[in-house]
Image: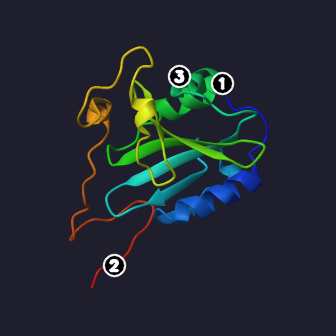
Amino acid sequence: MTRGRPSLQAIGQAAGIAAKRGVVIVIDPSKKSPFDLYFIRSQDIVAAKVKRARSRIREPKEIAVRFKSEIAEIRTQQLPSLVQREFWTLAPWGSWQFFLILNDRIIEISTDGAPIRSSLQDQEKPAPPGPPSALQGVAPRVSAPDQGFLCPFYAQVRE
């Protein structure tokens, strides 16, 4: 169950940000979808939920507490492995924060979808050198097959 009406202005701004990452499909709020927009990239599809936050979220664990019902609703959606779940928040002063929602954890990401290194490590343990190990559970980024692929959200005939 979500709290309050959907923020149409925030969703509009989010669509502009998402357009830099792929082809955007904004969902009509009256459709009662758990996601506000989808965007299609060459390697995957992202389903995003947009909410307003009253203050900055300091760490990914905090979002699981503040938006408990929304995060639970997103996680319960049965989606193909090609679809990633993201949760976007807009603060009153206009700054955005983006989070990748996985089954077992939440990772803060940048505008372009790249993980923010500080969100990948525990504050008590320093991060080991090398590539972040927390990304092992992230869905692999694969390209769609050239022939015979029909996206359920965006169909395009290749010639």
Decide: few, some or many residues near mark 2? Use Cα within 10 Å; few <14, some 14-19, many ≥20: few
Label 3 environment density (alpha carbons within 10 Å; few <14, some 14–19, many ≥20): some
Label 2 element class: loop
Q: Are marks 1 and 2 in contact (CB under 8 Å)?
A: no
- The residue tagged 3 is 61
Q: Position of residue 77 (x, y in %)?
A: 47, 36
Give the distance between the C-alpha atoms of the residues marked 2 and 3, in whole angstroms: 42 Å
Task: Judge whether residue 20 can be spotted in this image.
Answer: yes
Determine the residue located farthest toward the top in the rendered image.
124
Residue topped by disc 2: 157
How many numbered discs?
3
- Asked if the residue under mark 3 is in contact with the one under mark 1, i.e. CB atoms within 8 Å, the reply is no
- Residue at 73% in and 33% down: 55
Q: Which residue is mark 1?
A: 66
- Quadrant containing the C terminus is bottom left
Nearest to the eye among marks 1 and 2: give it.
Answer: 1
Q: Is residue 59 left or right of residue 4?
A: left
Real-space CA distance between mark 1 and mark 2, rounded to the nearest whole angstrom: 43 Å
Question: Which amino acid type corresponds to the residue marked 1 in the rendered image?
Answer: Arg
Of mark 2 and mark 3, the one earlier in the sequence is: 3
Q: Position of residue 36 (x, y in %)?
A: 61, 49
**Image quadrant for the N terminus?**
top right
